[in-house]
Amino acid sequence: MDVLEKRPTTSADAQLLADIYAATRQDEVAAWGWDLQQQAIFLQMQFQLQQRAYALQYPDATHHILLQGGAPAGHIIVNRTPQSLHLVDIALLPPHRGQGLGTAAITELQREGAVANLPVTLHVLKSNPAQRLYARLGFTRTGESETHYAMTWQPLHPR
């Protein structure tokens, strides 16, 4: 993947964002034995809660739709502060996973961090296989909660 394509998220992307969220939790929720309608209601409620939480915690974060071949493939949310670039969330639709799009988005953020001499931070669920990607890209564990690991990538010349 040479050039990362993205565009700012708009209100017209609400359903797309809900679909991206649902795709990240589909397997987990399906394993609970609920019917499809129950799953859909639960995933919509969880999506709405996540959106509210992000808006409260990161009111100044930038939201972008990631594109592949001009088509929506996922999203990324980044909160920029004078101390760090925080990767709030990145998620891809299943057909676009494993093709380098997530790597391209994260390495673009790392380049931005290197230029600004700022670390890139994130939190990842302990059960999320994306941990391997983050480790491969130079992120190290810097803390943990019951459910998440905190990870940080430092530029070559940290503050």
Image: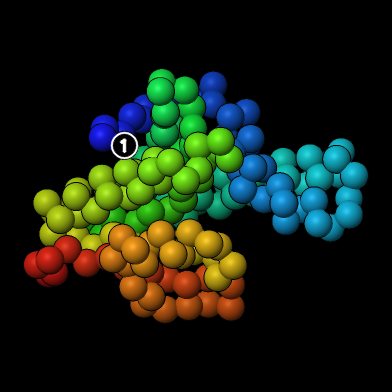
Q: In which quarter of the image is the N terminus?
A: top left
> Does residue 32 sit above or below 43 in this rendering?
below
Q: Which of 11 and 104 is in front in this view?
A: 104
Label 1 sits on residue: 1
Based on the displayed image, in which of its 4 quarters is residue 39 positioned?
A: top right
Is residue 151 at least partly visible in the picture? Answer: yes
Instruction: Between residue 50 and residue 140, name the one nearer to us.
Output: 140
Q: Is mark 1 on a helix, strand or loop?
A: loop
Report whether 117 appears left or right of 92: left
- Residue at horizontal 39%, vertical 40%? 101
Residue 129 versus residue 148 in the image, above or below: above
Instruction: Identify which residue is drawn at 84% across, 58% down.
Output: 32
Query: Colour scheme in the image?
Result: rainbow
Image location (x, y in percent) of residue 156 = 12, 66
Give the image quarter of residue 157.
Answer: bottom left
Which sits in the foreground, 145 or 141?
A: 141
Q: How crowded is mark 1: few (under 14 residues within 10 Å), some or many (20 or more)?
A: few
The spot of residue 115 in percent (x, y) is: 11, 51
- Quadrant in the rendering for residue 82: bottom left
Q: Position of residue 130 (x, y in %)?
A: 48, 59
Q: As displayed, is residue 128 above or below residue 39? A: below
User: Looking at the image, is 69 positioned above or below residue 65?
Assistant: above
- On-image quarter of the C terminus: bottom left
> Would residue 55 be seen by someone viewing this image from the given angle?
no
- Number of numbered discs on residues: 1
**In the displayed structure image, the side of residue 124 where residue 29 appears, left or right:** right
Question: Where does the image place residue 116, in percent across and percent down from the top left?
Answer: 13, 53
Residue type at mark 1 is: Met
Residue depicted at 54% across the width and 26% down the height: 13
